[in-house]
Amino acid sequence: MADNYETFKEQIYRITKIDLNLYKERQMKRRIDALIGKHKITSYNTYVDTLKKNPVMFEEFVNYVTINVSEFYRNPEQWNLLERDILPYLFNRFGNNLKIWSAACSTGDEPYSLVMLLSKYIPLARIKIIATDIDKQVLEKAKLGVYNVKSIKGVPPKFVTQYFREINNSTYQILDNVKACVEFKQHDLLKGAYPSQCDLIICRNVLIYFTEEAKDEIYKKFNLSLKKEGVLFVGSTEQIIQPQNLQFASYKSFFYKKI
């Protein structure tokens, strides 16, 4: 782009309240330039003017930069560890009425996966999960609960039979009794107020896009949100270096306990 990216970041903050300074610049600039190029726009200023006038492109931009990639039971070995080791610990420490937050939940694959897993041990009527994301568009999709075959490929067959209805050969919708277990809310990890007294927080494959400073700030807020000895579950590329500096102890791979 011919004009100034620093100015562009300031303009974007004014109209979206998304602070692009908190994202890794090379990755984010490459993504944004590709999006702008797709629309045959040749300058940041022209693109900002377009975003102000075109609500469809505005929503597209917010959705694009907040990076929504999700699928049911992503990284199944980590879900196995959650079931085998973490859930028994949480049940023993906090009882069965767990307060769970799925942060940056995208299209709902993760919180719905968690509901189905918990249903093996707790009646659906007693499962309540808070699920948040910055993107209103993906939250609406999450509430609808319609997924293609590729998204649900990791779901155990018994759960597909028990908790989904087939719309056609390639599309499934999750049932209302599972949806009722999840409360979806819009939330910005960088600015919003965090839930309190959580037993388990899941935030996976999102913080890799933030600067180290922003990540540390988010981890500190997660720590404050957890009960003592509560657990944070992160993504497979997001291991915390020196977790003790953030008041966490490494518990299992990709799981950290508040100390």
Image: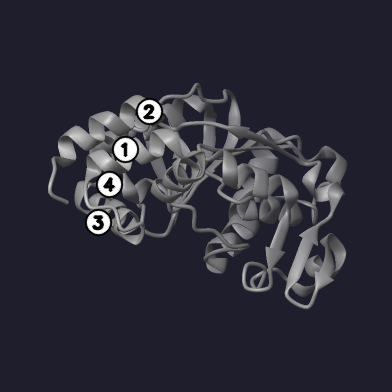
Ranked by sequence position, the earlier of labels 3 and 2 is: 2
Task: Check disc 3: other Cα within 10 Å, few if <14, some if 14-19, many if 20+.
Answer: few
| Residue that mark 3 sits on | 30
Question: Which tag is nearer the camera, tag 4 or tag 3?
Answer: 3
Where residue 238 sits in the image (x, y, percent)?
36, 52
For label 1, the crowd category at 10 Å Cα-Cα, with few meaning under 14, some 14 to 19 and many 20 or more, is some
**Helix, strand or loop at disc 2?**
helix
Disc assigned to residue 48: 1
Q: Position of residue 22 (x, y in %)?
A: 28, 36
Q: Which of the two discs, 4 and 2, sits closer to the camera?
A: 2
- Given residues 159 and 23, the one toward you in this image is 23
Looking at the image, is mark 4 or mark 2 earlier in the sequence? 2
Q: Is residue 62 above or below residue 195?
A: below
Q: Secondary structure at mark 4?
A: loop
Q: Amino acid at mark 4?
A: Ile
The image quadrant that residue 99 belongs to is top right
Residue 220 in picture, x, y percent from top left: 37, 29
Disc on res. 241: 4
Where is 43 relative to 226, above or below?
below
**Whether residue 245 can be seen here:** no
Q: CA distance from mark 1 to mark 3?
A: 17 Å
Q: Residue at x 31, y 58 (%)?
A: 40
Q: Which residue is mark 2?
A: 15
Of residues 85 and 189, the one nearer the viewer is: 189
**Label 2 crowd bin: few (<14), some (14–19), many (20+), radius 10 Å:** few
Q: Is residue 50 visible?
A: yes
Amino acid type of disc 2?
Ile
For marks 1 and 3, the one nearer the N-term is: 3
Q: Residue at x 35, y 61 (%)?
A: 38
Q: Is residue 72 above or below residue 10?
A: below
Relative placement, left or right, of 208 versus 227 is: left
- The answer for how far apart the CA atoms under marks 3 and 2 are is 21 Å
